[in-house]
Amino acid sequence: MKTKAKSIEECQTLFEIEVTKETLDKAFEDVYDEIIKVANIPGFRVGRAPKELVKKRYEKSAKEEVLKRLIPEAYKRALEDHGIAPITLPEISDVQLEEGKSLIFKARTETRPKFKLKNYKGIRIEKKKIAVKDGDVDKTLDNLREANAKYVGIENRQLQFGDYAVSDLDCFVEGKPIHKKRENLWVYVDKDSITPQLCEKMTGMAKGEERDIDVALPENYPDKTLAGKPARYHISLKEIKMKVLPNLDDEFAKDLNKDSLEILKKEVSKELENRMRLGAEVDMENQLLNKIMDDNVFDVPPSFVARQLSYMVEDAKRRLAEKGFKKDDLDKRGKELAGKFKNDASRQVRLLFILDEIASLEGI
């Protein structure tokens, strides 16, 4: 058997493999002998049909079986001959198979990147200083108040900015609904909302009132095919709610199972300090890994990059879907996202091999 191995770009090896005529002839003989034993040919008892007739009738099946036996064996020997450890299954191509001649084919496989790890010890990095400020504590307390807010029904006035409108809502573009009817939808009536015109025209509504409102959908509407188009909303206002924040006092602290506001503030400060410390550790780790990767640049297997890129794109599409983007729009964004994440995907794969090499060198 003859084999040639040629390294090509991006951690790939191309083998040119030739199996001798003698080996091929023997494989055909073995296969045809096995077929003869079970071949059911009219006019002949099983196992008694002439070999030439069997060859004529079962030539295609015999070739498939010969390839199934010889290609894996020849490929394995080629790997051993050239000392190559593949990390993917081979792609077989350019198969030349004819009885009485040699079997010739090519096999392309991906291999581990070859690199000598540099500069992964003694790296200097910066540690962020940790300091919890009063403003940080105050902001967290405000968030806790928001999370524990109560929503009180309003009966004696009309809807105004700052209220929550509990509504049934339909939206039509060119007379056709663009989504299923939304029932009991909470709409925060705010000038800075995604649909400020809608919110403005909702003000003044009374509980139980129905109203048709004509507005243009915002340019940043999730479905780009509808962005900017004239739309009609049919709104049925079922309730008006006002958010009421709890007072920042000992009673509020007790509602959170703390003995006093002072104790709550101390625990918030301690939790913020722990988060900052964890963030500083993550930042140092990122500094370290980035410096190692900057000093160790090499090609990585394309199939690994493709898998990582696919994961990153699908994860991004999932998060966009949670924000209301439709499937058609997400599919259109696939190519854009792939271009955006390609370098990051390659970098993540390179980091995988770097960390694996460090583990090997350090006996981890």
Image (tube, rainbow, N blue to C red):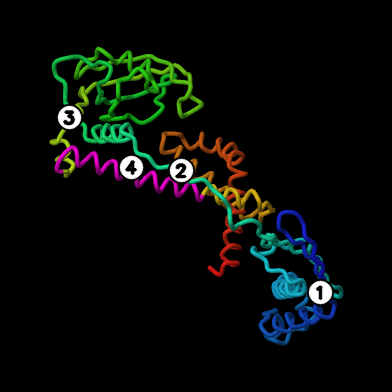
Residue in view at x 32 percent, y 31 percent? 135
Secondary structure under tag 1 reads strand
- Ranked by sequence position, the earlier of labels 4 and 1 is 1
Secondary structure under tag 3 reads loop
Which residue in the structure is indicated by mark 4?
272
Mark 4 crowd level (few <14, some 14–19, many ≥20, 10 Å Cα): some
Is residue 225 at least partly visible in the picture?
A: yes
Residue 181 falls inside the magenta stretch: no
Q: Which mark is residue 247?
A: 3
Q: CA distance from mark 3 to mark 4?
A: 22 Å
Report the mark closest to the observer, 2 or 4. 2
Callout 3 touching callout 4 (CB < 8 Å): no
Mark 1 crowd level (few <14, some 14–19, many ≥20, 10 Å Cα): some
Q: Which mark is residue 128?
A: 2
Which residue in the structure is indicated by mark 1?
19
Q: Residue furthest right?
A: 101
Residue in view at x 78 percent, y 74 percent? 56
Q: Amino acid at mark 4?
A: Leu
Residue in view at x 61 percent, y 59 percent? 353
- Ranked by sequence position, the earlier of labels 3 and 4 is 3
Query: What secondary structure is the stretch in magenta mostly built from?
Result: helix
- Ranked by sequence position, the earlier of labels 3 and 2 is 2
Callout 4 touching callout 1 (CB < 8 Å): no
- Ranked by sequence position, the earlier of labels 2 and 1 is 1
